[in-house]
Each structure stands twice: as C-alpha cells, then as structure tokens.
Amino acid sequence: MKKRTFLRTIGLATAGLSLSPYVTQAIPSDRKVRVGIVGGRFGTSFSFHEHPNCTVEAVSDLRQDRRERLMQVYGCSKSYASLAELLKDPRVEAVFLATPAPDHAAHTMAALRAGKHVLCAVPMAMTVEECAQVKEEVLKTGLTYMMAETSTYMQSTITAKKYHQEGRFGEIFSAAAEYNHPGLEVLWFEDGKPTWRHGLAPMHYPTHCTAFLIAVTGERLTHVSCLGWGDDSPLLKGNPYNNPFWNETAFFQTNLGHPFRVEVNWKGALRSAERAEWRGSRMSLYLPMGHGDRHVKVQVAGELGKDDAGFEHTANRVEDYSPTQWWQTDMLPEALRHNSGHEGSHTFITHEFIQAIVEERMPEVNVYEALAYTVPGIIAHQSALRGGERLAIPDFDDK
C-alpha cells in the first residue's frame, strides 16, 4: 500500500504538515484481540489486561522470574521460555515486543512472518538496512505494526498536537528536544557480563526526542550535523557498537526548512528529562527541565515592557500552564482512564495498538512514522563519527 493510501487511512490532513487526532474513544465491539507479551521488565508496565477489546493470551521471557512477574501482572496462566515458542501458539494474534533494542528488527520480522500483529518498543532497529527490512516485511504481510514511542502520547505532546491543529502556534519555526538519562552505565553490566546497553550510541536511541516534533507537525528530518562527547573512561572501551561517545547533540533540518536541535545524553551533571520546546510565530511551549519543574507558555503580545538594561520593547506574555490530563477523558476507554508510565503515555499506546487492530486501520506510529523517528538518529551518529559532517537522511516514505 502506498504512503498516500496510509495517510488517508489514518487521517493525515496534509501529508507532512499536520495531524488529525488519532486516539479516540473505543468503538463498541465484541472483538477480543489475543495478545502475547514478550519481555518481563518494560513489558510489565502496560495495560493490555484492562482494555475491553483485549485478552492477554500468553507471556514470555528468557528468565523464569520475569515470566512469573508477567503472569502476575497480567493475570495470565500461560507462559513460554522464548519468543520462538510463543510465536508457535495459534491463539496469539498479536505481540508486544519489550525486548532488547538490538533484537527489535529480528524479533519484529519473526513475529510478522508468524502472522502476528506487532507492537515493538523503541527504537525500530539499529541500522538503516534493518529499518528497510522491517518496512519490507510490514508491507509484504499487511499486518499491523506499531512502535511504542512514549513521547508521542505524553500529555504535553497531545496538548501541543491540539494547539498545532488549532493554529495557535502560528508557524513552528524551530524546535528542540532532549533526553537526559545520566547513570545508565549501572545497567551496562549484569552478573559481570555486558548487557545490550553497554556503549549504546546515544543517537541510536533518538525516538524519545524526534517524536516530539514529528508527532506534532508531521515534518520529516532531511539533513543532520551531529557532534559527540566522550572521555577516556574504561567503561566505553570494547563496547559492541564501537561507540566512543557518552552524549550526542544533533542539528537537524526538516523538509520545511526548519531547524530542530536534539540532545541525547547518558553522562554528566544533568537533570533527567524527556522534554521539548516548540517555538512558534504566535505562541511557544516549553516543557519542564526535569520532573516537577514548570510548563511554560509564551504568547506574542502587543504590550510594552523594558529589559534589564531599561530599553523599551514589545514584551511577550509568559505564563505557567498545566497540560490537560488527557488520560482522564474519553480519549481512552473507561478502564484505562488512570495515570501510567512516561507521563500517562502507556495506556494510550495500549489503546491505539488494540484499536488499530479492531478497526483494521493503521496506528499513529505506523511503519512510516517509526522510520521517520528512528533513521535520523542512526544518520546523526554517523555524522558524529565524522566530526559533524552534514549528511542527508534517507527518505523511506513511498512516493
């Protein structure tokens, strides 16, 4: 199916420019989607057992203790010791893959080939080649694929989408996003052995940032220049990614010619944050610098003011604001109207995936959006390895 057909199906008002709302109250249906949950860490934080159109049929993890935890959370009595075993179960219609990032492409394609719909944790894949392979498999099978990006469904992002659709920003002429998660090196080793996180390039995990712009405006990132920072820490030595950087900062250009700065930082004197800034000709939004900080709205005003040097100028109006708690509204089925992980996003991800299957439509973060979120980060890391060389980003949207 061509991109334009996908766009009509999911309701894009203008390709690459603005998005119509996706998540709506469930259409009454007796359909029960039978889901398998794979991955007993992140996989335990979702709400499939609460969705009126879903049944958790089976769970899986390589570790018994995590399988038991999944069974407890989802009230499920059936478990498998591997994804391969779960995929053989004919009663499982769809899977949620909360597995290590380097396995996402292989696990997604295995599930699709087994005839299962797929919701996969981020990122989509680790290389451009893997991304292309996943896209090909999704189009070949015609099954539902969704990437579980949390930033798309944070309450602040949903608010920004609504403001953009209403034209309240004017033109969003620039944006910025950052994902600061210092201290992750404690997860690099387990029982003395390296985990998949050891040395992961920051820009290979870009989607918590790229989603903030792409989900709101629909723009595509076309070019990038990126710089990285590392040190002589022995922790970085010998990592499987040959990555020398703790932190990376990328400067993207969009298809509308707008600048977009993205930072992914693993180490330093940083405030942990997943945040964004949308700067518009009429209004701007600034998300908090860490949990508990303020949300700020800036609106163009015609009032006169003075700066700290006493110069008179036209002053914009700056005010605190609180984003609507959309999880309390009929955007979700009643059973899912509770707060959840990553600023209320987990119940929205659960609902959107199940609704897309029930309604036989593409989900919001479908294969094209997942590519748009993921591939720019892969290219950004290549730029950082080349000292900031400006590189073009492949376009995976069908013409």
Image (cartoon, rainbow, N blue to C red):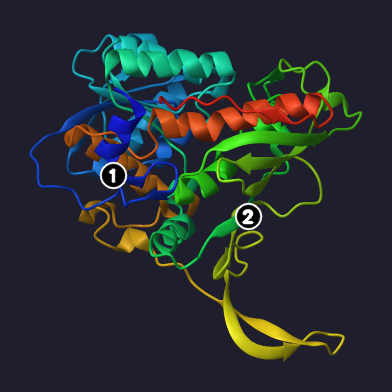
- Image location (x, y in percent) of residue 343: 47, 55
> Which residue is depicted at the point 77% across and 38% down?
247
To which quarter of the image does residue 111 belong? top left
In the rendered structure, the answer to whether residue 290 lies left or right of residue 168 reads right
Residue of label 1: 11
Relative to 255, residue 285 above or below: below
Q: Given the current orientation, which residue lies at the most extreme left position?
A: 30
Regarding residue 319, the answer to whether it shows in the image is no
Regarding residue 382, the answer to whether it shows in the image is yes
To which quarter of the image does residue 279 belong? bottom right
- How packed is label 2: few (under 14 Cα within 10 Å), some, or many (20 or more)? some
> Which residue is depicted at the point 56% across and 45% down?
256
Badge 2 marks a residue whose secondary structure is strand
- On residue 174, the disc is 2
Q: Name the quarter where the N terminus is drawn.
A: top left
> Which residue is depicted at the point 53% across and 48% down?
213
- Image location (x, y in percent) of residue 332: 26, 53
Answer yes or no: do the residues labelled 1 and 2 have beta carbons within 8 Å? no
- Image location (x, y in percent) of residue 232: 92, 28
- Image location (x, y in percent) of residue 163: 43, 64
**Nearer-the-camera pick, 341 or 40:** 341
* Amino acid type at mark 2: Ser
Badge 1 marks a residue whose secondary structure is loop
Q: Given the current orientation, which residue lies at the most extreme right position?
A: 232
**Nearer-the-camera pick, 345 or 147:** 147
**Nearer-the-camera pick, 32 or 353:** 353
